Amino acid sequence: MKIRTRLTFLFSGITAAILLLLVTAIYISYAREREDDYYKNLRQQAITKANLLFDAGIDPHVLQLIYRNSSSTLSQEEVAIYDTDLHLLYHDAVDIDKVKETPGMLEKIKQQKEIVFKQDQLQVVGFTYSHQNKTYLITAVAEDEYGLARLRNLGYILAFSYLIAVLCIIIVARFFAKKALKPVSDMVDRVEEITATNLDLRLPEGNGTDEMAELAITFNQMLDRLEQSFDAQKQFVSNISHELRTPLTAMMAELEISASRERTTAEYLQSMHHAISDARQLVKLSNSLLDLAKASYDPAEINFKPMRLDELLMEARDEVLKAFPFYRINVNFEEPQEEEDYLSVEGNAYLLKVAFVNLMENGCKFSASHEMGVVVTWFKEYTILRFIDDGVGISKQDLPNIFTPFYRGGNGQYADGNGIGLSLAARIVKLHKGTISVVSKVGQGTTFTVELTHV
Ligand code: ADP
């Protein structure tokens, strides 16, 4: 069931129930008041009749005649008077006798002084009446035809008004539910328009203050993030294809030229070396991409274990030197630590080594001397690793971008690369809840500072 229909039902249901209570309360209180008034009225009429008999000395036959000739005997009160020995002294019409006065009933009147009760529509009142030191028991019976007719009328009017009111409430509730939920249906319409090709569309934010606006704003913020990551993905894919195309095109050109005619063995060897170098570049790129994908996993999926940083640094150094034997990397530990804990971090050895290898390789490849140093400072809570070189340095314009995937600085022509290394290192450090920062001066050198906590 739609919220709109549910709201309509709920609102109309509650209001209709309250209205029903109100209408019923009005009806019941009117009915009671009419009944009480009529009992009083009956009593008064009976006393008047008794006074006519006792004081005015009216002949009982006259009163009986009046009673019998009244237009409606039902609404005409029928009075009976008894003495305290329960002897009947007067009766309006013994033969009609709407309610039979039993001895039990008369006894009850004697004891309780006054009783009232209903028999079908007839109302009966019985009471004791003192006159000239004598006590009488008087009963009066009649039907409040006029009052009951008015009560019935009131019932009809209330029922009719109630139905009309409920109908109006349903219409109004439907209208307001529709109006209140209009922003939601507008949102649904707009969201249906949003696809991968028009992620720039946004929801209307209305007045910017109510809950609907909050929802729209939150949704728009989510779309902003989605659009950004979508653009980043697109950029990433186009960068990858570009990076793959360059060595592949070079390799193909090289091989096509050598295949175009017969060559000497030396020429074949040379073109094979070129092709191998291009293939190596491709392998390095695909490995870097694989590592980048691993570093982008959810941290919960990555295996973290305690490990010694000093050992990891040495392994990274060995790996770089194996690939580039002419590089020189000096690792210095400031103040040797007795505390074993100071040397360990909770991390993923493979990824951390990838980060260190990249930082070491960069330091060496962007220095004319192909030499760099790593200085490690231990603290109780964390360790600071500084990767220092005195190479070409990074320009001020390049500095803010060097951690962006595929970004290569203006000094890129100085050494081969694909622009992934630093972004990968930064992602790995972030994954370990650490920080990475850079200070560089063109022509003087660069220092990358990595801070890692021990746990
Ligand atoms: P790559 O080294 O493959 O170009 P990186 O992501 O490792 O890619 O580095 C991005 C850019 O940052 C490099 O192209 C270079 O301009 C700059 N850079 C990184 N490390 C250094 C360094 N030690 N000295 C000078 N420039 C550096």
Image (tube, rainbow, N blue to C red):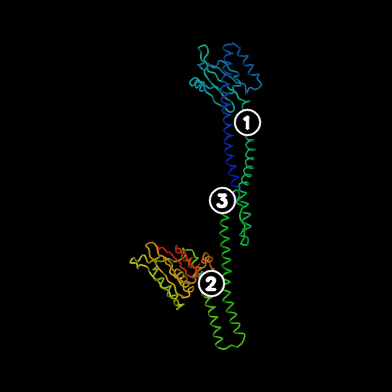
Q: Furthest-left residue in view? A: 338
Q: Earlier in the sequence, mark 2 or mark 3?
A: 3
What residue is rendered at 41% in x and 73% in y? 330
What residue is rendered at 54% in x and 17% in y? 82
Q: Earlier in the sequence, mark 1 or mark 3?
A: 1
User: Marks 2/3: CA distance?
Assistant: 46 Å
- Relative to the observer, which residue lies in front, 145 or 272? 272
What residue is rendered at 60% in x and 44% in y? 9
Report which quarter residue 228 is drawn in. Answer: bottom right
Disc 2: CA contacts within 10 A as few (<14), some (14-19) or many (>=20): some
Callout 3, which amino acid?
Glu
Q: Is residue 454 left or right of residue 289?
A: left
Q: Locate residue 157, reporting x and y percent.
A: 64, 33
Q: Furthest-front residue in view? A: 443
Q: Which element carries disc 2, helix, strand or loop?
A: helix
Is residue 291 visible in this depiction of the protein?
no
- Relative to the observer, which residue lies in front, 96 or 324? 324
Callout 1, which amino acid?
Leu
Q: Earlier in the sequence, mark 2 or mark 1?
A: 1
Which mark, by number, is residue 214?
3
Q: Which residue is mark 1?
A: 154
From the viewer's perspective, is residue 130 above or below residue 17? above
Instruction: Confirm or reject: label 2 Cβ below 8 Å from ligand 1.
Output: yes
Q: Locate residue 191, reporting x and y percent.
A: 61, 56
Q: Which residue is mark 2?
A: 412
